[in-house]
Image (cartoon, grey):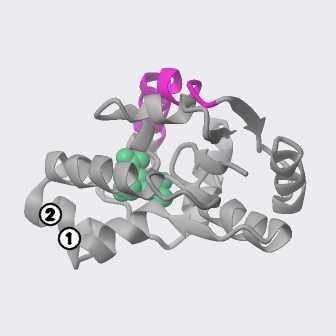
């Protein structure tokens, strides 16, 4: 049995799908951002504010490497930027990994981000117009890394249950 890695942009549904997938499959789920916060002893916005993004990316890389050393199967929701730094995209191609890119379009991401009340250091200081521009550019830059995942599941307009069923059919 494999290690299931979910990647995708902020608000693409990684954590929600990982939780539902865990329920449906009986495989335990982990969230990379939560493991980082536990290890650092502070929230992600605080790591960005007090230590900077580079430090955050270093911790993120270390924590991902350590987590993948566990032998037993698990589902892991990555952070939105995880595959895009420190060669992390190579982890998506490992033999013991089933990696899935939850692919959402800009319109869907904006809709979801506006409904959520989660602190996201990369987006929080932008006006709605600037956010749209930023996400379009960011998604373009990150697309290469997300597409290193072994599977792509389009999520626009689908219910979480539909997405879970599609992901389950991949392992
Ligand atoms: C980030 C996404 C966040 C978190 C950090 C950086 C990114 O995770 O890891 O704020 O670079 O896209 P979510 O995708 O779970 O919001």
Is 94 a magenta residue? no
Q: Residue at x 19, y 59 (%)?
A: 48
Can residue 57 be seen at all in this image of the molecule? yes
Secondary structure beneath dot 1 equals helix
Q: Is residue 153 above or below residue 40?
A: above
Residue 49: quarter of image: bottom left
Q: Nearer the viewer, residue 24 or 162?
A: 24
Residue 31 x/y as whole percent? 51, 65
Q: Quadrant of residue 93?
A: top right
Between 27 and 35, the one nearer to me in the picture: 27
In this view of the protein, can residue 127 be seen by the observer?
no
The magenta span reads 132-149
Can you say which quadrant of the picture contains the C terminus?
top right
For label 1, count other residues whose C-alpha is less than 10 Å away and answer few (under 14), some (14-19) or many (20+).
Answer: some
The spot of residue 29 in percent (x, y) is 62, 68
Q: Main SS type for the magenta part? A: helix
Looking at the image, which is closer to me, 114 or 16? 16
In the figure, 64 relative to 117: above or below? Answer: above
**Mark 1 C-beta to ligand 1 under 8 Å:** no
Instruction: Ligand 1: give its quadrant.
Output: bottom left
Instruction: Please report contact status of discs 1 and 2: CB closer than 8 Å, yes or no.
Output: yes
Identify the disc placed on residue 166.
none
Mark 2 lies on a secondary structure that is: helix
Q: CA distance from mark 1 to mark 2?
A: 5 Å
Question: What residue lies at 33% left-to-right and 57% top-to-bottom?
Answer: 63
Give the residue at mark 2: 49
User: Residue at the spot x=23%, y=77% of the render?
Assistant: 42
- Residue visible at 72% across and 67% down in the picture: 27
Where does the image place residue 53, in percent across and percent down from the top left?
19, 49
- Count the marks: how many? 2
Residue, disc 1: 46
């Amino acid at each position: 049995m494999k290690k299931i890695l979910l990647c995708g942009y902020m608000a693409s549904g990684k954590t929600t799908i990982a939780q539902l997938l865990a329920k449906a499959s009986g495989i335990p789920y982990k969230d990379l951002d939560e493991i980082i916060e536990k290890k650092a002893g502070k929230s992600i916005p605080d790591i960005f504010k007090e230590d900077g993004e580079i430090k955050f990316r270093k911790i993120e890389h270390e924590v991902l490497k350590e987590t993948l050393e566990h032998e037993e199967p698990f589902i892991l929701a990555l952070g939105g930027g995880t595959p895009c730094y420190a060669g992390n995209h190579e982890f998506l191609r490992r033999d013991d990994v089933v990696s899935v890119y939850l692919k959402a379009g800009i319109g869907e991401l904006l809709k979801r981000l506006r409904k959520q009340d989660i602190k996201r250091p990369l987006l929080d200081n932008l006006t709605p117009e600037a956010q749209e521009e930023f996400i379009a550019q960011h998604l373009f830059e990150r697309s290469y890394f997300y597409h290193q995942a072994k599977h792509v599941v389009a999520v626009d307009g689908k219910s979480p249950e539909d997405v879970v069923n599609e992901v389950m059919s991949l392992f």
